[in-house]
Image: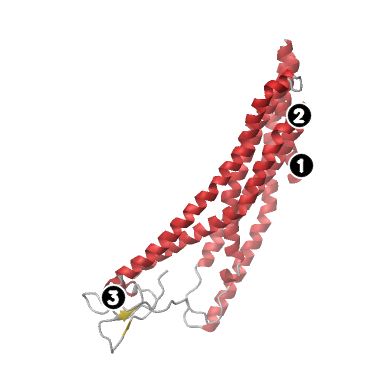
């Protein structure tokens, strides 16, 4: 049947749940016809395993959609890694192999596949669940849509507008967090040289700037994260509040029956709210991860390095006085640990002063 067909089967269970509950109350229990009421409840119970079977079949259809994307990413990463290795071997110079290809191939590709599958699942689930809820409310009492649809559309639109800035803040936070980790790792590896040159203070100030940037990024992310909670409140909770507020008037004017009210409450609390919450959470987390990982996997810098490219080197730091042990030995930051050489220059004219040209972090 495919993804669409099995999703319709799953949405049919959503529609039948509230519809059967409403008729069980109106045509059965409220009229003293317990048999009719139990029959409607039994119909709703039978629809549950049918919907579960449709959900199980949906996973297979989503896998058939996602796996080709994973295969294309794997081919892209392997082709780029091989091209980079061949160019490095042709240039010579003993450049080490790019070990990041292993991470991209074994970890980041799997993150992309899982995130894409999760996004497809929740988008499909929300779309068909919302369709089942709307169809059920139309069948019970079309006036329910006047209460439920406006806040649902407003909350969804609010989250959609905030999604791009939220993803941008998430990327900034991840970049700042990686910068802090890189800075701390470089400082730990070059601790001997930093101490020998007496550069503890400028290095600490440099690390403090990275940490402050990460703190600002995390606060900005938390500020925009409030929009997800607000959108969930508007789209998921406000329809329930409005329905309960308007129910006395709707019941007194016979625009709504008690069974229809119960069915609408079941639609909102058991179907729409969980689907909406899952949608917002998945798009905020998996959507951002997918964007970041796909950017890393498909960017040209992830596959190739310009011929003759050298690691970025910052300008020389201000000269500082050496430590009590004299000038640092030749070698870069962390030279005592077998790190690549980045020479510490000691001026013959100005003994007692040294500079660290290597870039930390």
Q: In this view, does 346 lie above or below 214?
A: below
- Indicate which disc residue 5 carries: 1
Q: CB atoms at circles 3 and 2 under 8 Å apart?
A: no
- Indicate which disc residue 143 carries: 2
- Indicate which disc residue 197 carries: 3
Residue 93 at what x, y percent from top left? 47, 83
Q: In this view, does 29 lie above or below 263?
A: above
Mark 3 closeness class: few <14, some 14–19, many ≥20 residues within 10 Å: many
Q: Which residue is drawn at 62% across and 30% down?
A: 241
**Label 3 to label 1: alpha-carbon separation:** 70 Å
Question: Is any atom of residue 121 visible in this view?
Answer: no
- Under circle 1, the secondary element is helix
- Indicate which disc residue 142 carries: none
**Label 3 to label 2: alpha-carbon separation:** 78 Å
Q: Residue at x 35, y 66 (%)?
A: 205
* Figure quadrant of the C terminus: bottom left
- Under circle 3, the secondary element is helix
């Amino acid at each position: 049947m495919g993804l669409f067909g099995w999703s319709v089967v799953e949405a049919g269970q959503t529609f039948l749940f509230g519809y059967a509950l409403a008729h069980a109350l109106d045509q059965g229990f409220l009229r003293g016809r317990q048999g009719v009421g139990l029959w409607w409840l039994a119909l709703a119970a039978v629809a549950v395993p049918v919907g579960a079977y449709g959900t199980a079949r949906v996973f297979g259809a989503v896998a058939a959609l996602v796996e080709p994307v994973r295969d294309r990413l794997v081919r892209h990463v392997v082709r780029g890694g091989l091209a980079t290795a061949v160019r490095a071997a042709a240039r010579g110079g003993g450049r080490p192999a790019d070990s990041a290809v292993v991470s991209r191939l074994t970890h980041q590709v799997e993150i992309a596949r899982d995130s894409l599958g999760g996004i497809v699942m929740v988008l499909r689930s929300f779309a068909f669940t919302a369709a089942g809820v709307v169809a059920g409310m139309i069948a019970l009492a079309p006036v329910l849509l006047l209460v439920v649809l406006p806040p649902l559309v407003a909350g969804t639109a609010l989250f959609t507008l905030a999604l791009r800035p939220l993803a941008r803040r998430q990327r900034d936070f991840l970049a700042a967090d990686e910068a802090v980790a890189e800075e701390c790792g470089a400082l730990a590896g070059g601790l001997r040289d930093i101490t020998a040159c007496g550069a503890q203070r400028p290095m600490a100030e440099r690390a403090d700037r990275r940490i402050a940037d990460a703190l600002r990024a995390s606060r900005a992310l938390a500020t925009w994260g409030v929009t997800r909670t607000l959108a969930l409140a508007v789209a998921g909770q406000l329809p329930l509040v409005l329905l309960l507020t308007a129910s006395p008037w709707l019941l007194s004017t016979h625009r709504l029956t008690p069974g229809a009210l119960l069915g609408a409450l079941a639609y909102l609390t058991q179907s729409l709210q969980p689907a909406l919450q899952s949608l917002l959470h998945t798009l905020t987390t998996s959507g951002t991860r997918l964007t970041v990982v796909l950017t890393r996997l498909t960017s040209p810098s992830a596959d190739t390095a310009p011929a003759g490219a050298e690691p970025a080197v910052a300008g020389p730091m201000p000269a500082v006085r050496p430590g009590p042990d004299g000038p640092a030995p030749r070698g870069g930051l962390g030279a005592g640990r077998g790190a690549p050489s980045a020479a510490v220059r000691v001026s013959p004219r100005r003994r007692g002063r040294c500079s660290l040209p290597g870039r930390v972090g």
